[in-house]
Image: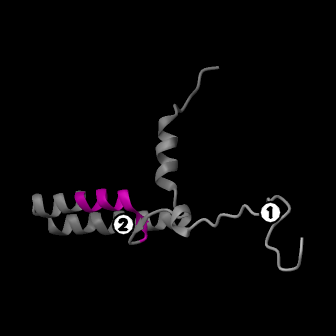
Amino acid sequence: MGQGSTAGPDDTAGFFAPVHRALAEPILLAGAPRALTIVNGTLAGAIGLGLRLWLAGLAIWAIGHALSVWAARRDPQFVDVARRHLKYPTWVRP
């Protein structure tokens, strides 16, 4: 290995493939997971516009978005983790 080589001990010479950031980072919309933001906005819009409860719809959106942004800052994959958690039973027979 010469000076200035970026190959580490586990790297094979000549085989280097950079990974773009977009492939490794989760897709966030306004700081929250995209799917959860769309569901939250749709629910708040249905309550605010459909039922004409403007303040309730706005409150649901603001609280839901704030909670999802807080959770995404702690763990950007929290929606996938919660789905996986709900898939398994709470008690497994021996």
Which of the two residues, 9 or 12, is positioned nearer the viewer here?
A: 12
Depth-wise, is mark 2 or mark 1 nearer the camera? 1
Q: Which residue is mark 1?
A: 13
Q: Is residue 4 above or below residue 50?
A: below
From mark 2 to mark 1, how far is it between C-alphas?
47 Å
**Residue 40 among magenta residues:** yes
Q: Is residue 11 left or right of residue 23?
A: right
Q: Which residue is mark 2?
A: 65
Q: Residue 48 in the image: x percent, y percent?
A: 16, 64
Q: Residue 50 in the image: x percent, y percent?
A: 11, 58
Which corner quadrant holds the N terminus? bottom right
Label 2 sits on what residue type?
Answer: His
Q: Residue at x 52, y 42 (%)?
A: 85
Q: Pick out the residue farthest to the top.
A: 94
Which corner quadrant holds the C terminus? top right
Label 1 sits on what residue type?
Answer: Ala
Q: Residue at x 52, y 34 (%)?
A: 88
**Mark 1, other Cα within 10 Å: few <14 / some 14–19 / many ≥20:** few
Circle 1: element type:
loop
Q: Residue at x 28, y 63 (%)?
A: 60
Q: Residue 46 in the image: x percent, y percent?
A: 17, 58
Q: Residue at x 12, y 63 (%)?
A: 49
Q: Is residue 92 left or right of residue 55?
A: right
Which residues are the magenta region?
31-42
Residue 79: image tag: none
Which quadrant of the structure image shows residue 33? bottom left
Asked if labels 1 and 2 touch by Cβ distance under 8 angstroms, the answer is no
